[in-house]
Image: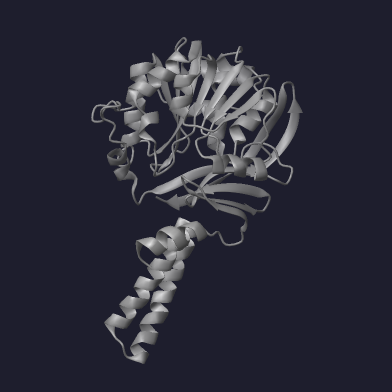
Amino acid sequence: LGSFGTTFVLIPAFDVVTIAAFYGGVLLAAAVVVADPTPLAAAKIGVAVLVVFSAAVVGIYGVDVGEDTIYTDQTAYSELRVGEDDGVRTLYLDGVRHSATYTDGRDGYVFEYSKYAHIPMLYDDDVEDVLFVGGGGFSGPKRFAAEYDVDIDVVEIDPGVVYAARAHFGVSEGPNFDIHVMDGRRFLESTDEEYDLVVLDAYQRSSVPFHLTTVEFMDLVNDRLDDDGSVVANVISARSGDGSEFFRAQFKTMQEAFPNVYAFPTSETDSLQNIELVATKGQARSQAELEALAAERDVGIDLTGEVQNYTPPSEVDTSDVPVLTDEHAPVDALLQGQVGKEYVVLENESTTTSEAVGGPSVDGQLNVARATA
């Protein structure tokens, strides 16, 4: 069709993934004909190509057997899909699970790593203003709004994600809940609001916006926090060895901007996993202190298991990774070690809810979901 047909016919009518799949099919068919034009050979090769092509299409679209697709969209930033299976509704971005929520009445987070954003609530009993950079399915912001008496700002760059969250994940703005459709760094540069807690959840497994990783950005976050404020960054990485370079570089970078930085791996394996980085401007906290606070304080969610994954700075080797700066942030190179590694996500297989002072507490069995990067 050429550039004219692609620009004025295909792109207005179809999403990018469909166009790529179409052209891939055309190229495969042409390869079959060129390889051997005889009917029998072409038929045999055609069947093989069809099998391979079908598998590729399934991979591209992120089809999950048994899961119902209830919404799809090609946004300006990603291929978006909302699926539902067994009472769990999931938001996929470029085929990767980004957020999930229960639709069958169960309470709590589907993904275990989401609980770590509540750790600052253990030692700061005066949290009033919270900023989430990265919305997704808004499971974190919704839980904070339901659990605490706080004002919440959520910054999400993709209007398509915000639409999906409103239409399919029950997200709505209110007097204490505002959504800002813009880049997270630009929002922080433009606001003079002071926050008690900032949650950075804009990093994906294979796509990390480098300008949200640098020391200049972390300094900006620091400037927008009150004197004893905290930031929680959700990083996908291995905890050590191959595939851990980005986590260790991000840890080292945050140490340049904050006096106290701790890591909380969510899995004991060496696989790719969600690692939560908690940085504070206030006093340093030991694992023993956090464990005591988790046992004593009711913050509406049980964190006794999470604080046991506390990793102090002395156990994070940053000697061979750079500090990320606006001038030099080789994020893509740091992510190269993750290619082909298994990604492990802990999720609640079942949850039961019991009412307690301050809100519901959640207990659940853990299910391990695995994927390959």
In this rendering, the count of numbered labels is: 0
173 sits to left or right of 58: right
Say which of 86 and 364 sits in front: 86
Quick one: which residue is furthest to the right in this view?
355
Instruction: Give the quarter of the image for residue 300.
Output: top right
Q: Residue at x 35, y 85 (%)?
A: 42
182 sits to left or right of 30: right
Q: Is residue 227 above or below residue 359?
A: above
In percent of width and height, residue 164 lies at 61, 44
In percent of width and height, residue 290 lies at 53, 19
Q: Residue at x 41, y 26 (%)?
A: 311
Task: Tell me, yes or no, if residue 297 can be seen here.
Answer: yes
Say which of 331 and 180 sits in front: 180
240 sits to left or right of 264: left
Which quarter of the image is occupied by the N terminus? bottom left
- The type of colouring in the image is one colour
92 sits to left or right of 240: right
Q: Residue at x 54, y 33 (%)?
A: 181
In percent of width and height, residue 37 lies at 31, 87
Say which of 74 and 334 sits in front: 74
Task: Tell me, yes or no, if residue 305 can be seen here.
Answer: no
In percent of width and height, residue 19 lies at 44, 62
Q: Residue at x 28, y 35 (%)?
A: 330
